[in-house]
Image: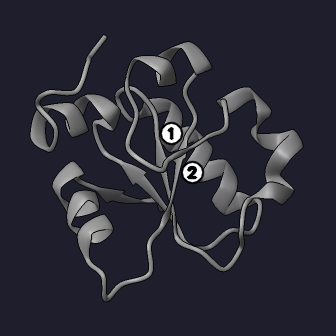
């Protein structure tokens, strides 16, 4: 089962200097990422994940992000099944981040 993070939880985590930062893995398409993104997130489109799995660190928390949280949940499940244990899904995706954390963020 994939743990769901709320946008505010991820925001607090990223702001907490006493806690190791997660890898924020954005699995949307490049055109979506150009419109809006969480600062310092890594863009790795969903369809490229299987071929580029080795690029992801096994010893780091990974928070997977998409537009509304559905693609990211599928990717998070795939990552977990591939042996990565520290995987989270951003519930509601970048849309929830924009609504709850960064209301000035462009949306689509």
SS assignment at label 2: helix
- Judge whether 48 appears above or below 31 on screen: below
Q: How far apart are marks 1 and 2 (CA)?
A: 6 Å
SS assignment at label 1: helix
Work out which residue is located at the far bottom of the displayed protein and give it: 18
Question: Badges 1 and 2: C-beta atoms under 8 Å apart?
Answer: yes
| Residue occupying image coordinates x 74% and y 27% | 47
- Judge whether 84 appears above or below 28 on screen: below
Q: Position of residue 91 (x, y in %)?
A: 30, 44
| Residue occupying image coordinates x 39% and y 35% | 69
- In the rendered structure, the answer to whether residue 16 lies left or right of residue 100 reads right
- In the rendered structure, the answer to whether residue 75 lies left or right of residue 96 reads right
Q: Where is residue 42 in the image (x, y as percent from the top left)?
A: 58, 46
* Mark 2, residue position: 76
Q: Where is residue 61 in the image (x, y as percent from the top left)?
A: 52, 71
Label disc, if present, on residue 72 of the rendered structure: 1
């Amino acid at each position: 089962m994939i743990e769901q993070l709320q946008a505010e939880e991820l925001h607090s985590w990223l702001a907490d200097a006493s806690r190791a930062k997660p890898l924020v893995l954005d699995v949307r398409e490049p055109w979506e990422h150009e419109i809006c993104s969480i600062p310092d997130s890594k863009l790795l489109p969903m369809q490229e994940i299987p071929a580029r799995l080795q690029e992801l660190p096994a010893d780091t928390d990974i928070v997977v992000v998409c537009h509304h949280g559905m693609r990211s949940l599928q990717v998070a499940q795939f990552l977990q099944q591939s042996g990565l244990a520290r995987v989270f899904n951003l519930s509601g995706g970048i849309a929830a981040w924009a609504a709850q954390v960064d209301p000035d963020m462009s949306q689509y």
